[in-house]
Amino acid sequence: MPSDPHAWLVTVAWRRWLDHVRSEAARHRRERADLDQPPPGPTEQADDTLHLLFLCCHPALTPSSAVALTLRAVGGLTTRQIAEAYLVPETTMGQRISRAKRTMAEEGLSAHETRDLGRVLRVLYLMFNEGYSGEVDLAAEAIRLARELVGRTQDPEADGLLALMLLHHSRRGTRFSTDGSLIALADQDRAQWDAGLIREAVDLLQAALATDRLGEFQIQAAIAALHADAPTADQTDWAQIVGWYDELLTVTDSPVVALNRAVAVGEADGPQAGLRALADVPEGIPRREAAQAFLLERTGATTQAARLYARAAARASSTAERDHLTKQAARLDSPPA
């Protein structure tokens, strides 16, 4: 018992009141501080895929290494899948990717050093094409990255590349039958083509062409747009397509472009004209024999065409293409019913 109970009670009561006041004051300060904080804004979404793409396309890397590294680092393909796409042993592709990584490490490369947008666009298009034939769907990812490029650059070729991808993508669902067989462009169900993607692509292409800075991807997109615009295969404007191929040859001087032009000439001016144009295409170009067989069949030389279809099938780069060409050869070899 305290010597002065009354004084002790007063002291205890005072200290408890003082603790209560201090606690309340602290609570008010915390609440005031919370009110003074700005409201939370949107969280920054950082996607470094585009940065990684530029890094993989650095000029210090060879084109084959850049593509392989992009498919590995950006596309997420395994070394085996990339090796199968390029028809090389897995060990060879593994060494190619390792060399590319070593080069980047030794040189201390950074994406900021990359200024070759054309190289990035070409690698991105290869990635898109691989999306159609490989085990992993890369087409959608390539389109997403192309959209980002369009948003960050003022380059009409980026617009042209995105338009080209969208036009090809609009036909994707009609390129193969339910059993996996390849369906030629002329036989595809055009009613099933994605009209929304085609409209978007045409708008992009028209804006790019209006800049008067013509490039390879814009021209390829213009050719694809003419195919998309034709209500039927027979109504395709082949004369204008030949004109675009002539323009494309001045930009690329590619034998593959010359091959495609020969087929277009065959459609516009007849198969004999197409064969004359094909004579200027070097032997050994992929699909040259298939194009020659197609044109010869239209001249009535079916036996020679069947033989060429069979040879082209033996050299096809995919199972679907091989089966399609084999069927063409068998069709011409079959006696009429």
Image: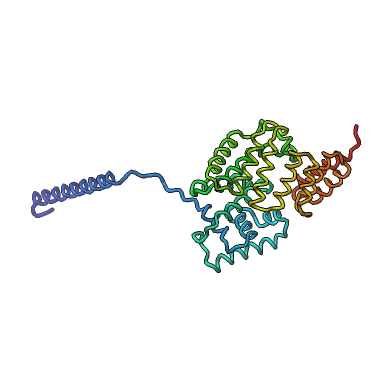
Total tally of numbered discs in the picture: 0
Q: Residue at x 62, y 54 (%)?
A: 71
In the displayed structure, 64 sits above or below 37; it is below
Q: Residue at x 65, y 37 (%)?
A: 226
Residue 185 spot, x, y in % from top left: 71, 38
Q: Nearer the viewer, residue 32 or 1?
A: 32
Residue 258 spot, x, y in % from top left: 72, 49
Q: Among all residues in the image, which is located at the extreme bottom?
A: 106
Q: Residue at x 13, y 53 (%)?
A: 1
In the displayed structure, 239 sits above or below 58; it is above
Q: Nearer the viewer, residue 159 or 101?
A: 159
Tell me which corner region of the image, top left, top right, bottom left or bottom right, holds residue 70: bottom right
Q: Nearer the viewer, residue 337 or 288?
A: 288
Residue 214 spot, x, y in % from top left: 58, 47
Visible residue check, residue 220: yes
Q: Is residue 285 left or right of residue 169?
A: right
In the displayed structure, 199 sits above or below 8; it is above
Residue 140 spot, x, y in % from top left: 59, 44
Q: Residue at x 74, y 42 (%)?
A: 265
Q: Nearer the viewer, residue 200 or 213?
A: 213
Q: Quadrant of the C terminus?
A: top right
Q: Is residue 19 left or right of residue 291?
A: left
Visible residue check, residue 183: no
The image's colouring method is: rainbow
